[in-house]
Amino acid sequence: MDIDLYKQQIENDSFNLQGVVKFVVELMLGLCAPARDPTIRSILSQSDPVEVFREVFGALDLMRLDLVNYQLRSLRPALLANSVQYEQDKFRNLLASNPAGLDKTKQWLGETERRMKAGNQPVSPSTLLNSAFIRLIQEEVDPIPETIAMDLSRFVTVARELSAVVFSAATILVLQTGVGPTVQHDSFANKVRVTVYQLCSDELISHPRDILPNISEKLVDIVRETITSRPLRDEECQNIRGMLSGLQSPSNPVYCLLWERAKQFFTSLCSGVVGPVPAGFSVCATDLQGVASKYTHLVSYNRGVFGPFYADIISEITSSQQASSSTSTS
């Protein structure tokens, strides 16, 4: 592009804007991702010079974003490998200036170990860590461990999404068991799953059971639409509402059973055992596997960064337990 020539043409009212635009568009087509071709070709249909420049600069922004995303994808393996060591070094520097920087983490792991022993569960470094991480999505751990502080919001998100999946599966089971064979098919289950899961995923919802009063009528309507052979009687609608109201209890047996199965599924994945989706989650399998993938990635990365610190703390816990046991026996 000869800028001086274009300047002279503009001064002499002989500048060919469409020719320049065509040249620019062809150049951009040769550089951009194929997915951007329709957007860039649409520039040629613009006759207003202002719109032409607006479209060109907009397309250039998209191309710049595509280039950045490509570079990040290319550098991702190296960034991940170096980020683990970088975070470890930074955390060691923090501990050097603050010797008490792991007190909350010790409390978290120590409490987990005591709970496991009280429940007669086998305690090993791997099982202890798995149980400790499960606590992060099952309850509000207080105080927050230092090693979890940066990832806490991500664990909270996983916990909320898992609760939504479990609640969706529990709702489907309750309805199919209570209503009977007329709703024992995937189309009904999928309608319920979509209705419940989408509302449960709202960040403003503290727990899925909070939405139950608002969607009970919607679920009754889904049952009514599914049973086309006869109208749904008032007492049947009331029975459905009664069954659903039972899910509002934190100790509801269906919800608790599915929650335990989901926990075992997550724990197995973190232990390297890839098993089938637990019973009761067949309709919600994709949702459960998506949340499980987020959870295992979080746990794996956290253990990669803080694994040496966890090993020292667990060794300290087991040593103190052995010392107290030998003292009591003597």
Image (cartoon, rainbow, N blue to C red):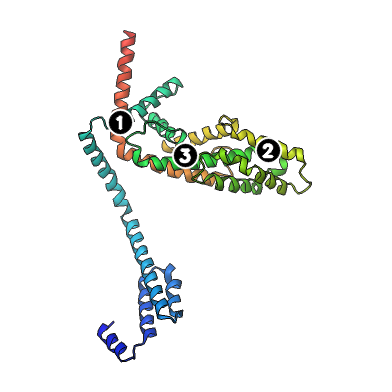
Q: Report the front residue among 100 and 319.
A: 100
**Which residue is located at x 33 percent, y 53 percent?**
76
Label 2 to label 1, Cα distance in Å?
A: 50 Å
Q: Report the front residue among 115 and 270.
A: 115
Label 1 to label 3, Cα distance in Å?
A: 25 Å
**Which residue is located at x 60 percent, y 35 percent?**
247
Label whose residue precedes the other's in the sequence (1 or 3):
3
Label whose residue precedes the other's in the sequence (2 or 1):
2
Query: Whole-percent x and y of residue 327?
Result: 31, 11
Q: Amino acid at mark 1?
A: Ala
Q: Report the front residue among 196 and 280.
A: 196
User: Which residue is under mark 1?
Assistant: 311
Circle number at residue 241: 2
In which quadrant is the C terminus drawn? top left
Whether residue 328 is situated above or below residue 266 in the rendered picture: above
Query: Whole-percent x and y of residue 181?
Result: 72, 41
Asked which secondary structure carries label 3, the reply is helix
Can you tell which of label 3 and label 2 is closer to the viewer?
A: 2
Residue 15 falls in image quadrant: bottom left
Query: Dot 2: within a 10 Å radius of its alpha carbon, few (fewer than 14), some, or many (20 or more) residues?
Result: some
Query: Whole-percent x and y of residue 329?
Result: 34, 9
Query: Dot 3: within a 10 Å radius of its alpha carbon, few (fewer than 14), some, or many (20 or more) residues?
Result: many
Asked which secondary structure carries label 2, the reply is helix
Whether residue 106 is situated above or below residue 283 in the rendered picture: above
Can you tell which of label 1 and label 3 is closer to the viewer?
A: 3
